[in-house]
Image (cartoon, rainbow, N blue to C red):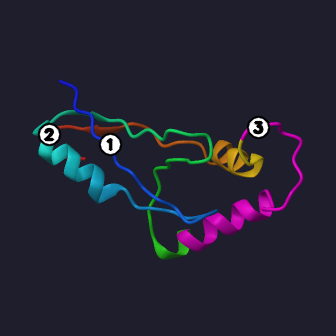
Amino acid sequence: MVVQEELELKTSGNGEMHDLTDSVRGIVERSGITAGLVHVFNVGSTGVIGAIEFEPGLQEDLPAMLNRLMPPRSRLRTRAPTTPRPIWSSTVSGCGPPRPKWNGSG
């Protein structure tokens, strides 16, 4: 069985983070599926989905680290239709692994 649902998030700019845990958990609970994998996907090149403990310190530390690694006003040679810096940020950040669900856990 495959269940698909779309979440739409609006962001106000660089470094903004959202905790998707409750939204994804709700989709899984409504599906009635008790075993399987959850796959969360981002459409676009400037966003990233990560699997990490979402806590207040992280919301400050991660954007600060990315800003040091790739300053927002840095001049990159990438030729892209969108701003190169967010593309590199999403590349460095990577994406989270699939989240397994067994017998109602996960």
Nearer to the camera, 104 or 95? 95
Nearer to the camera, 102 or 41? 41
Q: CA distance from mark 1 to mark 3?
A: 27 Å
Q: Is residue 95 above or below residue 1?
A: below
User: Can you tell which quarter of the image residue 91 is in?
Assistant: top right
Nearer to the camera, 30 or 13? 13
57 inside magenta stretch: no
- The image shows residue 8 at horizontal and vertical percentages of 39, 51
Which of the two discs, 1 and 3, labels the residue nearer the N terminus?
A: 1
- The image shows residue 89 at horizontal and vertical percentages of 68, 50
- Report the side of 19 relative to 87 (left or right): left
Name the outermost residue toward the top: 1
User: Can you tell which quarter of the image residue 6 is in?
Assistant: top left
Circle 1 is placed at which residue position? 6
SS for tag 1?
Answer: loop
SS for tag 2?
Answer: helix
Which of the two discs, 2 and 1, labels the residue nearer the N terminus?
A: 1
- The image shows residue 20 at horizontal and vertical percentages of 37, 56
Circle 2 is placed at which residue position? 31
Per the rendered image, the range of residues in magenta is: 59-81
Circle 3 is placed at which residue position? 80
Instruction: Determine which of the numbered discs, if any, sits on residue 34 in the image.
Output: none
- Report the side of 11 relative to 85 (left or right): left
62 inside magenta stretch: yes
The residue depicted at 27 percent of the width and 59 percent of the height is: 22
Name the outermost residue toward the left: 32
Q: Amino acid at mark 1?
A: Glu
